[in-house]
Structures are given as structure tokens and as C-alpha cells.
Image (tube, rainbow, N blue to C red):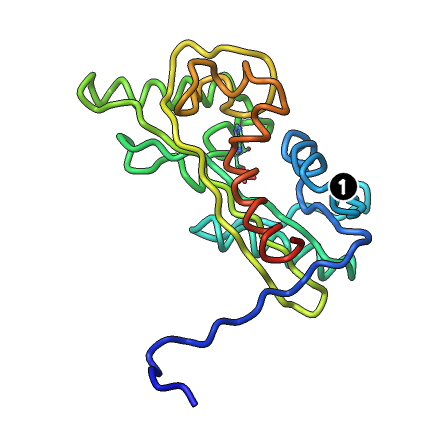
Amino acid sequence: MRLIDDEPPAVPHRRLAPGKLVIASHNEGKVREIRALLEPYGIEPVSAASLGIPEPEETGTTFFANAELKARYSADLSGMVALADDSGLCVDALGGDPGVYTANWAETEDGTRNWPMAMRKVEDALQAKGPEAGRDAHFVCVLSLCWPDGHVESFEGRAEGTLTWPPRGTVGFGYDPVFVPNGDTRTFAELAPEEKKAISHRADAFRKLVAACLG
Ligand code: IMP
């Protein structure tokens, strides 16, 4: 019998069995990083694109809501466990923007994404705040695993850093060329993939997922 009843009982996490898993993303940069993270665990990742599964509309207002809806969509259509990532850049001086709308800031009129333009927009917004505003920022990543029966497990990771200008480096994707992680002087786009894998928001979320569902 529980004597203290204001704490909910801990619910055990569901284990992820080896086998095929759908990566519910059409972002090549994310798919590449998630594949590298999954490799050591006997998981066979297949991309949603290779199964002809389209991207659902991201109607959520939080990273958790969007990661979950993307994972659920691919799990429903494929009948397999699906893993989705929702991530973004949060700039302190901009009240956390662009946040869940990080990809939208890169959208152009013809529907393509222009990352140099998006980085410029963030820089312009930051400069409009003046030199006192500071350049602290963090990347957030929520990874959601959804099983075909609807069960979901979600984990949040972070990478803290500052924004630099002009952009530097050619590795990585998205806003990597303007983000300098704390403890380094190079941007994410100047790090080797293995170095980014050790410290990124995606790797941080993945460590939590492994501890809960794979470890
Ligand atoms: P969404 O999760 O599809 O909404 O898109 C998030 C956007 O955040 C991506 O398209 C990237 O531009 C950006 N982003 C997320 N993770 C990273 C990263 O590791 N490096 C650079 N940009 C990132």
C-alpha cells in the first residue's frame, strides 16, 4: 500500500526490440544523424521517404506535440515503430524564437528552404534588439517513438551555445554555421560529424531514449 499518494507511480518505459524502424523525417541532415545514432543498437532504420510516406502538417505548438504527431503518422501508415524528431533553435533575446517555427523561417515563396536567408533573418532580429541583448541560444530536440498500437515515448535534449556572425563551416545542416556550442570556439558546421554527435541536442535526447528504451 502506498502511504504517500500525491506522487503518481512510475510507469516503466516500453523497450524497443531490434528490427526495422521508420525514421519519420524527410530532412536528410536529421535522417543521417539519427541513422548514425541508431547503428550500434541492431535497429534497421528505413526512411519515411523510401516507404512513400509523406510529411504530415506540423500543427503542434510545442516540440513534443510535433514530434509525437510525426511519429504517430508514420507508425499508423507503416504498421512499424516510428521515430520522429522535432527540433529547433531558441534564441534567448528573441523570447525563444524561432523555436518550433525554426524551419518556417527558412521557407521561400516557391516552397523551398533557404538556410542562408533564415540565418540572416535571425541575425537581423538579434541586431534589432541592440548589443545589450546577448547572443545566447540553444538547440532543442524532442525524439518521439510511436508503436503501431499508439504507445508513445518522448525525450527532450538540449545543446547550449551562442550565435556568431557571419556563418562559418560547411558540415552539418540548417543553422549549424551560426551556432557555437558552449566549451568550443567552432560552429556546429566546423565540427566533424563524430564531434557533433557527442554534444548535440539530438544526441542528448538520444542518450535519454537509449537509457529508457534500449539500454
Ligand atoms: P522541424 O523539426 O522539421 O520543424 O525542423 C527544425 C529545423 O531546425 C530544421 O529544419 C533545422 O533547420 C533546425 N535544426 C534542427 N536541428 C538542427 C541541427 O542539429 N543543426 C542545425 N539546424 C537544426
Instruction: Identify the residue under disc 1.
Output: 49
State whether residue 127 is above or below residue 137.
above
What's the residue at 40%, 22% (across, down)? 183
What's the residue at 36%, 30% (across, down)? 137
Question: Where does residue 90 sit, x and y in percent of width and height?
Answer: 38, 35
**155 or 88, which is in the foreground?**
155
Question: Where does residue 39 sit, x and y in percent of width and height?
Answer: 75, 39
Neighbour class for label 1 at 10 Å: few (<14), some, many (≥20)? Answer: some
**215 or 202, which is in the foreground?**
215
Element carrying mark 1: helix
Which quadrant does the N terminus fall into? Answer: bottom left
Question: Where does residue 158 sit, x and y in percent of width and height?
Answer: 45, 39
The amino acid on which the numbered mark 1 sits, given as a three-letter code, is: Ala
Figure quadrant of residue 13: bottom right
Question: Where does residue 88 sit, x and y in percent of width and height?
Answer: 47, 36
Figure quadrant of residue 160: top left
Label 1 CB-ligand 1 distance < 8 A = no
What's the residue at 39%, 25% (across, down)? 182
